[in-house]
Amino acid sequence: MFENFRERLQTAHQDFTTGFKTLSDKSKEAKIKKNQRREDNLPHFSAGVELLSRYEDTWVTLHKKTKECAKAAEAADGEVVMLSGQDHG
C-alpha cells in the first residue's frame, strides 16, 4: 500500500518538476521572441535622416525660387506702374 503511494508521489513529483521546467523554458523562449520583435521594430534612423535631408534641400530650393519670384514680381510691378503712368500723362 505504501509502495503504491510512494510511486504515485514520485510520479506526481516528476510531473510537477517536468511541468515547471517546461514553463521555465517557454518563458525563456517568449522573452527571446519578445526581444527579437523589439529589435525588428526599432526605427530606421538612416531612413529618417535621408528623408529629412531631402525635405531640407527641397525647402532651400523652394525658398530660393520664392525670393527670385518676389524680385521678378517687384520688377514687373514697377514696370506696370511706369506704363500706367505713361498712359495718364
Image (cartoon, rainbow, N blue to C red):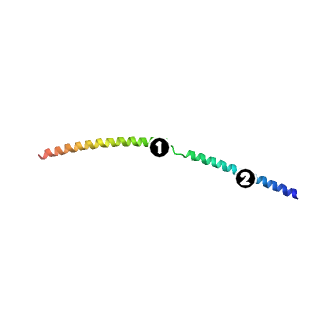
Please, which residue is most extreme toward the right here?
1
Residue at 23% from the left image edge and 42% from the top image edge: 75
Please tell me whether residue 16 is drawn above or below residue 49 in the rendered image: below
| SS at circle 2 | helix
Near mark 1 (Cα within 10 A), the count class, few <14, some 14-19 or many ≥20, is few
User: Where residue 51 sits: x, y (%)?
Assistant: 44, 42
| SS at circle 1 | helix
Residue at 57% from the left image edge and 47% from the top image edge: 38
User: Where residue 8 sits: x, y (%)?
Assistant: 82, 56
**Residue indicated by mark 2:** 20
Count of labels shown?
2
Residue at 45% from the left image edge and 40% from the top image edge: 50
**Residue indicated by mark 1:** 48
Where the N terminus falls, by quadrant? bottom right
Q: Horizontal placement of 48 versus 66: left or right?
A: right
Q: Horizontal placement of 58 versus 46: left or right?
A: left
Quarter of the figure with residue 6: bottom right
User: Where residue 46 sits: x, y (%)?
Assistant: 49, 41
What amino acid is labelled 1 in the image? Gly
Quarter of the figure with residue 59: top left
In the rendered structure, which disc, 2 or 1, sits on the residue that comes first in sequence?
Answer: 2
Q: Horizontal placement of 73 versus 7: left or right?
A: left
What amino acid is labelled 2 in the image? Phe
User: Distance between the Cα atoms at labels 2 and 1?
Assistant: 46 Å
